[in-house]
Image (tube, rainbow, N blue to C red):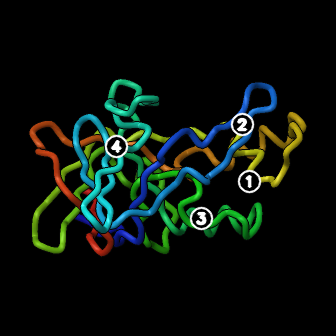
Amino acid sequence: MREIGSIKQVQIQRSSLKQGQRPQRYYDPAPLLAVERLRLAPDGVVGLGPAGEQLIDVHHAGHPDSKNRQGMNAISIGFTSHYRAMRDRFGAHLADGCAGENILIETDQVWTAQQLGESLVIQCADGRIVALEGLSVAAPCVEFSRFAHLSADPLTSDELRSALQFLDGGMRGFYVRLADGQEAAGIQVGDRLFAR
């Protein structure tokens, strides 16, 4: 196994980050909430707060306004190195975690899907192993591209194409799911991510 990095932050999306109606829809990271721990399950992610309260992520199948696509987007992961690259291109307003991933990994390398492979493992501080599989790219959207550009107005077709191409390929993050046979498990800041 090859170490990728350690978990810097875990968070949930309380509701959709895309607000308003087309064509005036916009991206707003306000519904993001950093939590103490995450519980990963086949149906999605539940955040655990300091008093033990459970907060369901909008991509969890059980959320009342669920954005779950048959489990394919139930858990998301991003990298601090990708945020540095996005800030270099678009500006300082792209704070770590603003793209909405559940798990943010501290690492110096920009990672592609090919480098990560299909199977990842989180090693928890207590020695437990959480197996993840089905890695896929979290494709960027028009609204996040506008947010990256700090533009409330529609981007030109060239600006939009350029932004979408830059943010694709995993720059904006990846989706994973619990491996077959993996029981629901809790993770937290400091746990380490490996590629198999």
Q: Which residue position holds label 3?
A: 83
Q: Amino acid at mark 3?
A: Tyr
Tag on residue 1? none
Contact between marks 4 and 2 (CB within 8 A): the answer is no
**Could you tell me which secondary element the residue under label 1 belongs to?**
helix
- Residue designated by label 4: 176
Residue 61 image-quadrant placement: top left
Disc 2 target residue: 142
Query: The residue tagged with tag 2: helix, strand or loop?
Result: helix
Task: Report, in whole angstroms, how far the alpha carbon at label 1 lies from the one at label 2.
Answer: 10 Å
Q: Position of residue 74 (x, y in %)?
A: 36, 38
Q: Position of residue 86 (x, y in %)?
A: 67, 61
Query: Which residue carries the number 1 mark?
Result: 148
Q: CA gap, disc 3 to disc 1?
A: 11 Å
The image quadrant of residue 143 is top right
Pick whichever, 87 or 58, lies toward us: 58
Q: Residues within 10 Å of mark 1 (few under 14, many from 20)?
A: many
Type of the residue with mark 2: Val
Distance from Cα at disc 4 to Cα at disc 1: 24 Å
In which quadrant will I find the C terminus? bottom left
Dot 3 lies on which element? helix
- Badge 4: how crowded within 10 Å, few (<14), some, or many (20+)? many
Give the CA distance from mark 4 to mark 2: 22 Å
